[in-house]
Amino acid sequence: MKRSCLLSIALLFTLFIGFSCQQNRQKTETSGQSDALTDEQNRAGEYFFDGMFTYLADAASLMESATGKRIPVAMRGMFREVEEKYKEVSQGNGVPVYGQFMGTLVLKGEDEEGPNEQLLITGLIRFDKDRTSDKLEELTGNYRSAEQQLSLRPDHTYELRVKNGETEKGRWFLQSEHSLICVSGPNRTVMDINYVEQSFRSRDDNPVVYTYIRE
């Protein structure tokens, strides 16, 4: 009888240790996943987006001023706050309203339809029901400096070609209504936008000016 009790206690102790180790391992794995997600979000960056925002039948989109392209809006992040403010200022669901937002482009969910990328809104700057997007605000196209040619595409990718044949590729976004950033790996190039002259000026010790090529 005594031997049986001792065996039972030893078995329970072994099961307890095993369960504790499993729990600790799960916590460590979950923590690692959380850290990885945070790093990924940091790499994604937060940028400025503006244009005509529309919400209808549980679907939202932004006709982006800088590209002239319609981007689906992810219904998470700050979306509920944006939805409530949109309903306050719009004349009804489906009516476009000009808005300015902070956010990032993310991949759509596996069960979602439409384009591969969506706008995840992380902050609402403002809605302005009296303003509309201007054709002059579109930034996509080809720009040229003395030594380089810069091509901005509607999918927020860019290509920079230098006379010596070198090429840089990456993604471009707005930092604010009047500044643009080109991101290629660890490289960041910030430029001021002149909408009237349709040009960019880099913020460098030796600034480069890119002027729109009219085709």
Image (cartoon, grey):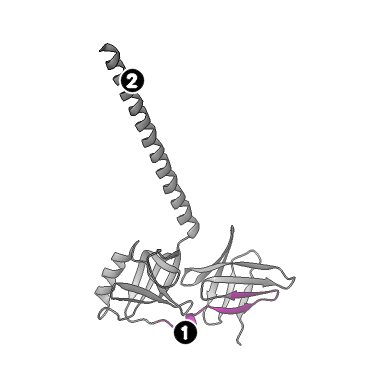
Q: Position of residue 158 (x, y in %)?
A: 58, 71
**Secondary structure under the numbered disc 1 in the rendered image:** helix
Figure label count: 2
Disc number placed over residue 27 in the picture, else none: none
Q: Quadrant of the C terminus?
A: bottom right
Identity of the residue furthest to the top in this view? 2
Q: Position of residue 188 (x, y in %)?
A: 58, 62
Query: What amino acid is labelled 1 in the image?
Result: Lys
**Secondary structure under the numbered disc 2 in the rendered image:** helix
The structure residue drawn at horizontal position 44% and vertical position 72%, both measured from the top left corner, is: 115
Gap in Å between the C-alphas at discs 2 and 1? 78 Å
Mark 2 or 1, which is nearer the eye?
Answer: 2
Q: Quadrant of the N terminus?
A: top left
Asked if residue 100 is among those painted magenta in the image, a careful observer would answer no
Kindly indicate the quadrant of the structure image that contains residue 125: bottom left
Classed neighbour count for the residue bearing mark 1: other residues with Cα under 10 Å, few (<14), some (14–19), many (≥20): few
Disc number placed over residue 135 in the picture, else none: 1
Instruction: Give above or below for 11 relative to 85.
Output: above
Instruction: Give above or below for 11 relative to 106.
Output: above
Q: Position of residue 162 (x, y in %)?
A: 70, 71
Tell which of 201 and 62 is nearer to you: 62
Q: Position of residue 30 (x, y in %)?
A: 40, 44
The structure residue drawn at horizontal position 48% and vertical position 59%, both measured from the top left corner, is: 44
**Residue designated by label 2:** 10
Q: Which residues are magenta?
A: 133-151
* Left or right of residue 209: residue 71: left
